[in-house]
Amino acid sequence: MALHSFRFLALAILAAAVTAASGCSLSDRKALLGFRQGLNEPYLGLFNSWKGSNCCLNWYGVSCDAATGRVTDVNLRGESEDPIFEKSGRSGYMTGKLSPAICGIGTLTTLVVADWKDISGEIPTCIADLSSLRILDLIGNKLSGEIPSDIGKLNRLTVLNLADNALTGKIPPSITQLASLKHLDLSNNRLNGEIPHDFGNLAMLSRALLNRNQLTGSIPVSISKIYRLADLDLSMNRLTGSVPYELGKMPVLSTLNLDSNSFKGLIPESLLSNGGMGILNLSRNGFEGSIPDVFGSHSYFMALDLSYNNLKGRVPGSLASAKYIGHLDLSHNHLCGSIPLGEPFDHLEASSFSYNDCLCGNPLKTC
C-alpha cells in the first residue's frame, strides 16, 4: 500500500513537472494574445516578451500555477518600480481597449491593468464570469460605460479598484453580494444614483472609497453594520439628508470624509465622542446648530475639519481636554465667543477660526 502511494506521488510530481515545462495551455495563450491585440504600448516594449509557446515563461506580467500550467495572474501596472520603467525614466502609457478575450482564462485570480492613462472603452461584461477572480484593479485609465451589472457573481473578490476612470451609471445593486470584498475603490468617476440600501451586506469591507462622483440620496444606515470598516470616503458627491448617528458607533471606523456634499441637520455627537475616530472631515456642507461639547482625554484627531457649514454657538471648551488634535478647521461658520485657552489652541493659526461671526481670543484679536 505504501509503495502504491509512493508511486502515485511520484507520478503526480512528474506530471506537474511536465506541465510546467510544456508551458501554459493553448487556450490561455490564445486568450492572452487576443487580449494583447486590443492594447497598444508604444514606448517600453512590454509585450515584446509575449512570444513563444510557453506563456508561463518570461511573459511580462503573466504568472501561472506551477502544478497545472494554467494562467492565474495578469499584472500590468503603468506606475511600477520594475527596472524596465526605471531604465526608461518614464511611467507607462497605453492606448486601446480591454478585449473580452481575457475572459477565456477561467483560472484567473488577479487581473491588474492599472495606471496606463489612455485605455478606453467599456469593462467587458464577461469579467463577471471569472469565478476565481480575487483582485480586479483597473485604476487610472479612461474606461467608460457602466460597471458590469453581474459584478456580484465574483464571490471570491477581495479587491475591486475602478478608480480614476470615466465610468457612468449607477453602482450595480449586485455589488452588495461580494461577500469577500475588503477593498472597494470607485472614486473619481461619474457614477450617479444612490448608494445601494443594503450596502451593509459587505461584511468583510475595510475600505470604501466612493468620493468624487455624482452620487445622490442619503447615507444608508446599513453601512453602520460593517464591523470591519475603517475608512469611508463619500466626499465630493451630491449626497443629502442627515448623517446617521450609528456611524459614530462603528468600532473601527477611523477615517470619515463627507466633505463637499449637501448634508444638513446637527452633527451627531457620536462622531465627535468616538475615541477611535482619527480623521473627520465634514466641511462644505449645511450642518447647523452648535458643535457638540463631547471631547475628552479619549479624543485623538489627526484632522478635524468642520469648516464651511452653518454652525453657531461657542467653540466647545472640552476641546482643550482632547489628548491630541493635529489639524483643526472651524473657519467659515457663525461661531461666537472666546476661543478656549490651552492645547490644542496654543499651536493653531488664525486660519483655523477665520470667517466666523464674532470669535475672539488667541490666535485672533483679543476679546
Image (cartoon, rainbow, N blue to C red):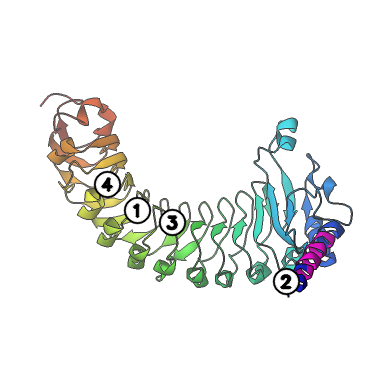
**Amino acid type for the residue under numbered disc 4:** Asn
Q: How far apart are labels 3 and 4 at the CA level?
A: 29 Å
Q: How far apart are labels 3 and 2 at the CA level?
A: 48 Å
Q: Residue sitting at 64 percent across and 52 percent down?
A: 142
Q: How far apart are labels 2 and 1 at the CA level?
A: 55 Å
Disc number for residue 309 = 4
Q: Which residue is mark 2?
A: 2
User: In this rendering, is residue 107 above or below 355?
Assistant: below
Q: Residue sitting at 25 percent across and 36 percent down?
A: 324
Please tell me whether mark 1 or mark 4 is closer to you in this view: 1
Q: Earlier in the sequence, mark 1 or mark 3?
A: 3
Residue 192 visible somewhere in the drawing: yes
Q: Which residue is mark 1?
A: 253
Membership of 16 in magenta stretch: yes
Q: Residue sitting at 59 percent across and 53 percent down?
A: 165
Membership of 277 in magenta stretch: no
- In terms of depth relative to the viewer, which is nearer, 349 or 161? 161
Q: Which residue is mark 3?
A: 206
Q: Earlier in the sequence, mark 2 or mark 1?
A: 2
